[in-house]
Image (cartoon, rainbow, N blue to C red):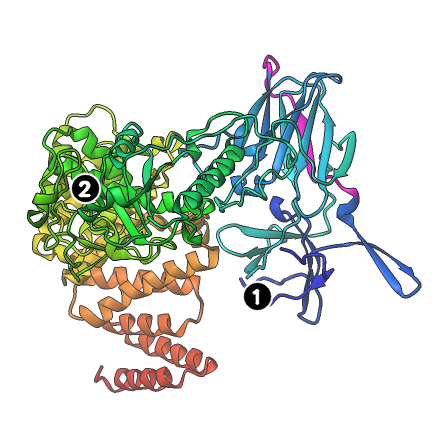
Amino acid sequence: MKNYFTLLFFVLSFSLFSQNNKLETGEYSSTTPAAESLKMILSDNNKFQLSILSGTYEVVNDSVYFKTSYDDTPKFVLEYSNPNLKSDKITIDLGENSYYRFYNVYVGIQKTSDAAIEYKTIKELLNVTDDFDYERKQLSFEIDKSSFIYFVEENLYKETVIEKYQIPNNVSQIKVTYYSNDLGRLNLKGFYDQSNKELIVSEGKIPLKFSLNKDIKKDIIKENPIEKRVEKDWTYPGKKEVDNYNYAVDSTAVGVGYADEIPKYVFKLKIEKTLVEAQKEASKYPNKMLLVFYDTSKNAQKEFDQYIEDYQNSNQYYMYDKYNPEYDNFNFYLATEKDKNSLKKLGIIDNQSIIFFNSDGVKLYHTKAKINDDNFAYYNMSTIFSELKLINSYAQLDDVVLNKKKTISQFKQELVKITSSGRSTYVSSIPPPAMPVETIGEVQVVEEEKENATQDFPVVEVDSATAAFQDYSYYDILKEKINLYKLKSKPDEVNAKYKNLLDFHQNDKAVDADLGTIIINELRLSAGFSGLLFNDYNKELNANDYKAIDYLLKFFNEIPLLQSEILGYQFRKDYLLESISMALGRTENKNQIDKVLNYFDKTASISSDNIWVLKNKMIFLKENKLDVQYLNTFNTFYKSYIKDDSSIIEQLDKKYNPDVDYSWFEYKSSFANDLNTAAWYVVEKVKNTNLDILSNAIKWSETSLKLEKDNYYYLDTLAQLYYLNGQKDLGILTEQKAIDSAILSSDSTLIEEYKAVLEKMKNGTY
């Protein structure tokens, strides 16, 4: 936030919910670690202030100079401890934080006072790779025993802050609290906890806690740096530029911190002399692509040479001191007049075109553009490569589905790439125009081009009638969708391979992580291969799906353990159960009710009546008008929360999960609403029912009013249940309470409705 020094105090509008406790006025200090600098001030006139900054000021003539309290305090607060006396390492504990909070933080290690300082980024220290678990809640890493540790907050627009700390010999753990002082805009609501004298304010999943400044808390001994300084353009030998958000970076601006240094590694591309040779060279690198510029103009060679030089310079700055394949994603070739016929067979008839191939020679995309087109400039190539990866996955899937020589494991790997892409691909029903050719390789030649085909550069026919038409509207650069590669595999071919894959793993003794990823995404449809490839987002469960669910249930306890090994929030138990139950609860499964309910019961049993399983089962039962089964299932759901006559709030609190439930209020309100919905279902749908169901419905309704007192919706439900149960006087009394409550809320429509119900109750016509 750029202007967070502008105000010392500001006023926010937020909803403060009462729990029938007296809210004490005064100054509250936040006890939430990430917001310890906040103070909430409540005054007697029902007004409040939220203090963000504090400090001192000095008046000099007509000017006022403010000095914040942060100016004299360290950015990093360290707490030393020695939990492991024999360790030759020191654990650096960053606490429960997001990795992205430390994107501009460096750590330097100095083993002795005269040793060199070895700096590393947090990314390097946490070993952030493609498999890094960004959902991880506890960040920590180890360093060797050292005498000094440096923490650096780099700021490209202001001075960089470097703090040096001395480490005693008997330290094996250092807890680090980082004060970045970046406060975003808050949308708050909360409640007052009378027992703990805390004001709890929520901005989402993690509530902020403010305590009255009455209790004197014992101070925790925290370490101050032995040295602190600020520097502009701070650097250290070998420092690489950090591109945390994958933004394209102009090579002329690369090298912040070592702008005057020449990269130690010289990156050079090998440019082939013919298109066939270029394709042959590209085939050696499965993870790379071939970019072909087709341009016969007189300046083409000069422009191509300049492009290659710019691309090489940019990449060598990224790599800096050694080759890094992460930045080497393309081979390049300049096609000229001699390649005209070969390119024509690939559908390229426009001079000054750009074509992309994968390593197998499959054309992924082409467009009419010049070599110096800004969209395809060297600084955009990482974005283009990212966009082409998903396109390439379709081509590679076709290869393993349609090629009988490919193994089931290769098929699995291609499905993993597609279902883990993080992108949903909408498939239009509009067929694409016929494309003359698609591929370089040993393939069938288009009939009209046979006479021009050469033995060393044949082409393949495109079945435009069956090819899926993907709408890649989210792409920034590859805008000509009609020129993108189109999937050739048909649904029955892919499903047959999927069956083979599931059969292959039926006797697994340990869970296969890749298969688990494929299954979970397929059950959720939006990220599954059926939706991504064939636009099948509303399908009835088939034999493959049930076999896949069996696999997940077989390894129900083992799958969550994969979270520590793989970037996979989908391996959490709650996400896993939600995926299964949502799939079972699809409306399209109405023709196989018994089988679906059997799987619901299996899943509920293995998960100890998980909330998602029961909720989706209830929705399915209601949709299929299975009233008694729905109400019995709801009673099981109710008992999973409320087990006895003790405090309802305490019992609900045991089930509350801040990682899943947004706030206590929404959680409590949602449960109360669920209770009223089920109770009203009895009133509306099953009036002529047995006493057990009525008794349960009254219990649910009474509980909803314990959570939300005087809610007129809930009072009306309870009144009618009392009346149906033969408790007519109590029903009339409760209906009058519903009217009184509605009058206070000025809900005129419901007031008249409730009065009509009350009149029927009184005259015996209800």
From the top left corner, tell me how far across and down residue 347 is, in percent: 20, 51
Tell me the tag on residue 14: 1
Along the line of sight, the residue nearer the viewer: 623 or 550: 550
From the top left corner, tell me how far across and down residue 201 is, in percent: 57, 57
Q: Residues within 10 Å of mark 2 (few under 14, many from 20)?
A: many
Q: Which quarter of the figure has residue 386?
A: top left
Q: Which quarter of the figure has residue 420?
A: top left
Q: Is residue 47 above or below residue 410?
A: below
Magenta part of the chain: 72-88
Q: Which quarter of the figure has residue 430?
A: bottom left
Q: Is residue 184 above or below residue 104?
A: below
From the top left corner, tell me how far across and down residue 401 is, in percent: 14, 37
Identified at 10% across, 47% down, the residue is: 449
Q: Indicate yes or no whether the magenta region holds residue 474.
A: no
Identified at 16% across, 66% down, the residue is: 689
Tell me the tag on residue 439: 2
Residue furthest to the top in view is 86
Look at label 1 and name its amino acid.
Answer: Phe
Look at label 2 and name its amino acid.
Answer: Thr
Along the line of sight, the residue nearer the viewer: 531 or 699: 531
